[in-house]
Amino acid sequence: MKPETFDAILEGIEEGGAVRNLCKDNSVSTRTFYEHLRADPENEKRYARAKELQADKIFEEILEIADDGRNDWMLANDEDGSPYRLNGEHVQRSRLRVDARKWAASKLAPKKYGDKLELSGDPDAPLVQKVLLCGPDDGAGSDTA
């Protein structure tokens, strides 16, 4: 694979493109791309950086979609006299687009965009770990009083 082609695919990834589509657009098989990627650790580093930038791009798209309300309302010719009504199909489609991008960003950069699971306790009553050791002499099951 030519270095210019590899660079073009990485640039496309940074802009949010899919590897499969970018390879097709550059007349390269995905297999060739991944072989070229694995052939050089520097290529792998550049690819990892491109995927990080792709996650950031996807995050920006989430904000753009969420903030874009242009087609949320449509003209209504209802008998009740209201001039506009909610375009539920557009709102649901926007929600789907946001959810799909949130999922993708969380997989591309889980530390940055993934759900965080954090265990914490009340500051006045913090979580405590206890380890109980049980052995043959612990008296469990003994009938003696």
Image (tube, rainbow, N blue to C red):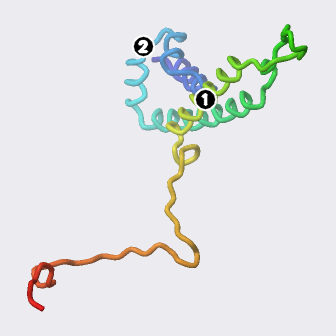
Circle number at residue 14: 1
Compare residues 57 and 24 and report the one nearer the observer.
57
Compare residues 113 and 46 and report the one nearer the observer.
113
Q: State if disc 1 and disc 2 touch (CB < 8 Å).
A: no
Kind of element beneath mark 1: helix
Circle number at residue 66: none
The residue positioned 65% from the left and 35% from the top of the image is 59
Compare residues 83 and 94 and report the one nearer the observer.
83
Q: Is residue 119 above or below residue 55?
A: below
Decide if residue 47 is on the left or right side of residue 56: left
Question: Residue 74, position in %: x, y?
Answer: 82, 14
Question: Residue 66, position in %: x, y?
Answer: 73, 31
Decide if residue 39 is on the left or right side of residue 102: left
Hey, which residue is sitting farthest front in the picture? Answer: 80
Q: Split into 4 quadrants, where in the image is the N terminus?
A: top left
Question: How busy is the neighbourhood of tag 2: few (under 14 within 10 Å), some, or many (20 plus)?
Answer: some
Circle number at residue 29: 2
Please name the amino acid that badge 1 sits on: Glu
Question: Residue 38, position in %: x, y?
Answer: 38, 31
